[in-house]
Image: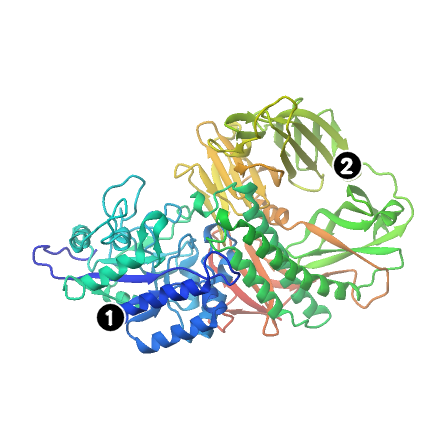
């Protein structure tokens, strides 16, 4: 720790750091580009009026990209004030990072940094924490990308949904889960506004300086100095007071940032107690760190409703984001597959634009309730572009596959880096499906009707597909041989090679027993829907119907959820699949003679959840969840509400229950009653549809391959119909297999005419990464995140992220 000093003799000035944080989204929403440019230009006038004043920008790279004239003016200001005007940050669109995928977060920084270099001609090397733009793997990513420092002082002390680690130190080594460290200036303990607080906090003082209209405001220079003395008493030297926030006057909440900024710049002009600094000067002024500060994976959450609270509008933000990203990854995968089989399709530029639209939709303000329609539009457009790329490429590949001499073929694609045997679906013309059978070579494969429309039918079957590859099935005329699902059905109990499940007489689940055990992981009668609708505490209970198909068994539960809403829960059990898929539908329905509107879910009160109570016989339960590029144990004593990107596992001594999700990322666990649940929705209820899965298992999450199951559920197998024809390509193919099992593929993609695989180690054990095809090793060269040559070999250290050029 820095040496404590005598405050009575101290003349060390308080360092003031002013960074302007806002953004123009280029799609005509939130604020106009003219407004952002006007506010910035008005702030730049302080540089002209007050030679001691300095300012920075953290606008998000999409702002500079979408407004070239504004970028030109910024370059001019940097040339005019080379030592007083600076740019920090580097992300593309200031995302809600802790609840977005690791791949998206990486691309925010990769694309953002490159766009800033291209538009402004500078290389940003100091990262400043954004509103909710934080996740635990940042230290190693920033270090790899060439950043020299991180400013961890959040833009607003009132942002309870944007926590950062704190330390009463002038500087720290910010250390990630993989042990990578980077120099950082931390937020000091206690420097965050809590609801109802009357005392002053750093950024609040700066943005409410000389503002008598603010509820807590009208601060003076003495307030700034007294705050500085309070930090010095903790042993901090030098002390920095920083603002990274919007710089316009916001009259609706009496936050007159612009007026307060003008006054603060003017009043400090001749006061030696204060010194304005740039981000670069700050990092030169702080001493070498004497302590480390962990990037605690359990700290980063987004629980505040202003950042799209879990369950808001039925999780449509997260679901749309999750499904759009699945389309984007399929687009990238198809480009890499084509390069190996039929030649380069030159789709890099198109996919880059699709990714940027997707990243723009992840901006924390676009995800706000008032802009959700814009988010849907952007995610739809990103999906449309990505599906256009993958559709065009996969059709070209399919046209050269040997598909036989039947009436057609179904080709199933697997974008994941391990072989899969799962339930797959394909859309066929109704006439073809009614009089045809499916074959793998000469073996008939049972299939069943999943859904029907006027002219088409969706068929489901169990497909087995190689890693990062495809499998072709023949469709031949003739009736399908009589088939019945291989699961054993006895009354309300369904048994598979993985588990047995017993449904209740009035719905719900009475028993969920993993193979090899006699103990249920859940308490009878506790599985179902629970929450508040229209101010009434509700619980699902309904009629149960079990239907045995050719491939799967469906258990449908339906009934009333409170006075105004009906529900239907459809459980699908497939013998070859280790989890039960669960589709939930909730919709309002007026009953004759019942007055009033249906009301809102979880307002006030608990959000509607899909819940289960864990069997106390499981023993002490660990809660393990997936985060961006990381798997980490969560401590529910911190908060019962938390996020899990694709899965969360509640594991006891020998048994556990994993809950997989398709975008419903919000989880809640009640330690007292051992009740766990997925947050489905809050707010208005129109017609809700959502998907999740239950996976009972033996052993821990690694032994039970929960992580692989979560990836599979989030990226289901889908097939396309292709005509029968000869071809030069085989009926099955794998681009590559990735080993060992503790390595997760984040993305396989093409860039600058080469194929790359981005991976991360997820178990906390080092891994010697190997890529192979048909048992033959593939050449793999380790590169940096920017795809430059680096000194590393194929060894991936615990929880490290790595990129390899394949072939």
- Colour pattern of the rendering: rainbow
Compare residues 314 and 575 and report the one nearer the observer: 314
Along the line of sight, the residue nearer the viewer: 115 or 150: 115
Residue 26, above or below 717: below
Q: Which quadrant would the C terminus be assigned to in this image?
A: bottom right
Viewed as shown, does residue 488 lie left or right of 252?
Answer: right
Name of the residue lying farthest toward the left: 9
Mark 1 vs 2, N-terminal side: 1
Drawn side of residue 570 relative to residue 615, left or right? right
Residue 322 at x, y percent in the picture: 58, 51
Residue 307 x, y percent position in the rendering: 45, 47
Residue drawn at 61 percent across, 74 percent down: 753
Is residue 164 visible from the viewing direction of this image? no
Residue occupying the point 74% across, 26% down: 490
The image quadrant that residue 664 belongs to is: top right
Crowd band around label 2 with a 10 angstrom C-alpha radius: few (<14), some (14–19), many (20+): some
Q: What secondary structure is marked by label 2?
A: loop
Residue 762, compared with residue 392, is above or below; it is above
Residue 252 visible at all = yes
Asked if the residue under mark 2 is in contact with the one under mark 1, i.e. CB atoms within 8 Å, the reply is no
Numbered label attached to residue 486: 2
Q: Which mark is residue 49?
A: 1
Q: Residue at x 61, y 46 (%)?
A: 709
Crowding at mark 1 (Cα within 10 Å: few <14, some 14-19, many 20+):
few
């Amino acid at each position: 720790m820095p040496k404590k000093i005598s405050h009575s003799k101290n003349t060390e000035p308080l360092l003031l750091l002013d960074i302007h944080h806002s953004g123009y989204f280029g799609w005509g929403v939130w604020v106009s580009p003219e407004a952002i440019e006007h506010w910035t230009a008005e702030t730049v006038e302080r540089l002209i009026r007050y030679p001691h004043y300095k300012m920075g920008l953290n606008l998000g790279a999409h702002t500079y990209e979408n407004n070239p004239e504004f970028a030109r003016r910024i370059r001019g200001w940097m040339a005019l004030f080379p030592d007083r005007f600076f740019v920090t940050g580097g992300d593309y669109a200031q995302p809600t990072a802790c609840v977005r995928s690791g791949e998206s977060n990486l691309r925010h920084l990769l694309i953002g940094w490159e766009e800033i270099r291209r538009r402004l001609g500078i290389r940003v090397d100091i990262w400043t924490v954004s509103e909710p733009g934080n996740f635990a793997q940042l230290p190693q990513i920033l270090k790899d990308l060439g950043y020299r420092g991180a400013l961890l002082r959040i833009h607003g002390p009132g942002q309870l949904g944007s926590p950062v680690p704190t330390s009463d130190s002038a500087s720290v080594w910010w250390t990630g889960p993989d042990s990578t460290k980077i120099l950082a200036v931390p937020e000091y303990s206690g420097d965050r506004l809590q609801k109802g607080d009357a005392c002053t906090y750093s950024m609040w003082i700066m943005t409410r300086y000389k503002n008598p209209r603010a509820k807590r405001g009208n601060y003076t220079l003495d307030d700034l100095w007294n705050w500085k003395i309070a930090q010095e008493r903790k042993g901090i030297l030098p002390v920095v007071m920083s603002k990274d926030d919007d710089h316009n006057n916001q009259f609706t909440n009496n936050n007159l940032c612009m007026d307060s900024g003008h006054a603060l710049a003017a009043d400090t002009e001749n006061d030696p107690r204060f010194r304005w600094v740039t981000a670069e000067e700050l990092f030169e002024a702080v001493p070498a760190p004497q302590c480390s500060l962990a990037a605690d994976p359990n700290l980063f959450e987004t629980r505040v409703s202003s950042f799209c609270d879990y369950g808001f509008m039925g999780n449509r933000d997260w679901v749309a984001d999750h499904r759009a990203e699945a389309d984007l990854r399929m687009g990238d995968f198809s480009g890499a597959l084509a390069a190996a089989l039929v030649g380069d399709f030159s789709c890099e530029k198109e996919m880059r634009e699709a990714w940027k639209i997707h990243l723009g939709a992840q901006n924390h303000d676009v995800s706000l309730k008032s802009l959700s329609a814009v988010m849907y539009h952007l995610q739809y457009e990103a999906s449309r572009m990505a599906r256009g790329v993958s559709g065009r490429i996969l059709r070209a590949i399919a046209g050269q596959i040997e598909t036989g001499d039947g009436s057609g073929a179904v080709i199933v694609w697997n974008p994941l880096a391990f072989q899969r045997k799962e339930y797959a679906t394909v859309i066929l013309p109704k006439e073809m499906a009614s009089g045809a059978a499916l074959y793998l070579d000469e073996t008939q494969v049972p299939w069943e009707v999943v859904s029907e429309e006027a002219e088409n039918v969706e068929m489901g079957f169990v497909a087995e597909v190689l890693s990062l590859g495809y499998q072709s099935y023949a469709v031949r005329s003739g009736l399908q041989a009589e088939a019945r699902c291989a699961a054993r059905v006895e009354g309300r109990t369904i048994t598979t090679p993985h588990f047995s499940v017993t449904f209740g007489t009035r719905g719900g689940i009475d028993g969920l027993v993993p193979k090899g055990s006699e103990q249920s992981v859940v308490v009878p009668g506790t599985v179902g829907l629970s929450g508040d609708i229209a101010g009434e505490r509700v619980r699902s209970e309904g009629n149960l119907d079990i239907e045995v198909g050719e491939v799967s068994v469906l258990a449908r539960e339906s009934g009333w959820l409170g006075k105004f809403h009906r529900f239907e829960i459809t459980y699908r059990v497939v013998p070859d699949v280790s989890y039960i898929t669960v589709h939930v539908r909730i919709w309002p329905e007026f009953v004759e003679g019942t007055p009033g509107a249906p009301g809102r879910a979880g307002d006030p009160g608990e959000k509607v959840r899909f819940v289960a109570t864990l069997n106390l016989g499981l023993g002490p339960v660990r809660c393990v969840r997936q985060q961006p590029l990381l798997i980490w144990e969560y401590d529910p004593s911190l908060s019962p509400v938390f996020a899990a990107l694709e899965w969360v596992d509640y594991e006891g001594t020998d048994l556990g229950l994993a809950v997989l999700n398709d975008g419903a990322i919000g989880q809640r666990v009640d330690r007292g009653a051992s009740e766990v649940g997925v947050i489905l929705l809050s707010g208005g209820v129109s017609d809700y549809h959502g998907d999740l899965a239950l996976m009972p298992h033996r052993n821990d999450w690694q032994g039970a391959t929960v992580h692989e199951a979560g990836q599979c559920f989030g990226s289901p197998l889908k097939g396309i119909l292709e005509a029968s024809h000869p071809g030069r390509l085989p009926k099955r193919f794998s681009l590559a297999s990735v080993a060992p099992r503790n390595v997760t593929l984040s993305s396989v993609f093409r860039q600058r005419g080469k194929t790359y695989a981005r991976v991360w180690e997820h178990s906390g054990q080092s891994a010697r990464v190997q890529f192979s095809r048909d048992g033959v090793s593939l050449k793999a060269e380790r590169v940096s995140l920017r795809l430059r040559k680096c000194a590393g070999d194929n060894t991936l250290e615990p929880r490290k992220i790595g990129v390899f050029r394949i072939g």
